[in-house]
Image (cartoon, rainbow, N blue to C red):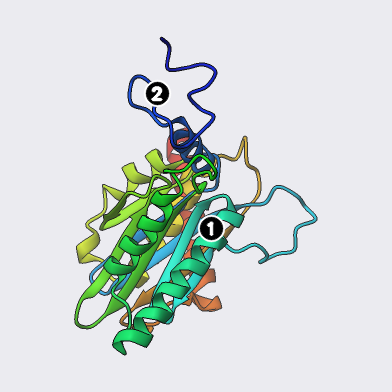
Amino acid sequence: MSSIGTGYDLSASQFSPDGRVFQVEYAVKAVENSGTAVALRGKDGVVFAVEKLVVSKLYESGANKRIFNVDRHIGMAISGLLADARQILDIAKEECKDYRSNYGSDIPTKYLSERVAMYMHAYTLYSAVRPYGCAILLGSYNPDDGPQLHMIEPSGDAFGYYGYAVGKAKQNAKTEIEKLKLQDLDCRQLLKEAAKIIYQVHDEVKDKDFELELSWVCAETKGRHEFVPKEIFEEVQKHAKASLEQSDSEEEM
């Protein structure tokens, strides 16, 4: 009996004979077809960088962002289906609101990631629904707990990381992340590294145009998740492009 064939991929609630759930694997594939998202956790905060692919010249600049505010102290970067991610964003916001209403304080990022992961996992258990086709990166910072970074997969698995990448070039991005001494870098340095990684892994042959999105939550922002100010963004983008040109010239030599 073959696990690849008619029947085993029609429902998220059905296992194949070799223990695979094909609907979840298809959801992971949807994430791998999307632009790359990178999150780095340093000594004083977390930064997000996203490669937002521009598939049409008619797109308005800045539309369809892939970095969101979940709460005042938590940011979210996504890769995969944007409509699915917006639904997860609404669920995460409700969790933050309920926690503050019940306990009078900001929700811990680890607790939020566990709650959202449980919700995403529930959509892999029933034949009437399909798994969410997006991967979620959550980051926060406060003086007591320090920086926190968590990732949630379409299957509902959730993990804590010092640095992670999702999307079509995640393997190349993770290789670059592993070269960094993240715990020794502050957020301004991390922004340059994250932007440089996005430019390095971007496939100019298949995906010619993209917009870079950058945000941070750190000591400098007083624990609030914010998009990077324009002057810092331009400085970081200029540094990333210069690094890419330098590496290209070295390869040609």
Q: Residue 241: x and y, percent?
A: 52, 55
Q: Residue 103: x and y, percent?
A: 29, 86
Pick the front one: 64 or 248: 64
Pick the front one: 156 or 203: 156
* Residue at the bottom extreme of this rendering: 104
Q: Where does label 2 land, which residue? A: 16
Pick the front one: 75 or 198: 75
Mark 1: which secondary structure?
A: helix
Residue 238 visible here: no
Image vertical order of residue 135 relative to residue 28, above or below: below
Image vertical order of residue 236 relative to residue 218, above or below: above
Residue placed at 34% from the left, 52% from the top?
A: 164
Image vertical order of residue 77 relative to residue 97, above or below: above
Picture quadrant where residue 118 is located:
bottom left
Pick the front one: 249 or 57: 57
Residue 104 shown left or right of residue 90 in the figure: left
- Between discs 2 and 1, the one toward the N terminus: 2
Residue 81 visible here: yes
Q: Which mark is residue 85?
A: 1
Q: How many numbered markers are drawn?
A: 2
Kind of residue at disc 2: Ser
Residue placed at 38% from the left, 66% from the top?
A: 47
Q: Quadrant of the C terminus?
A: top left
Kind of residue at disc 1: Ala
Q: Which mark is residue 185?
A: none
The answer to whether marks 2 and 1 mark residues whose Cβ atoms lie closer than 8 Å is: no
Residue placed at 28% from the left, 68% from the top?
A: 111
Q: Residue 43: x and y, percent?
A: 23, 70
Residue 163 shown left or right of residue 128 in the figure: left
Q: Residue 104: x and y, percent?
A: 31, 90
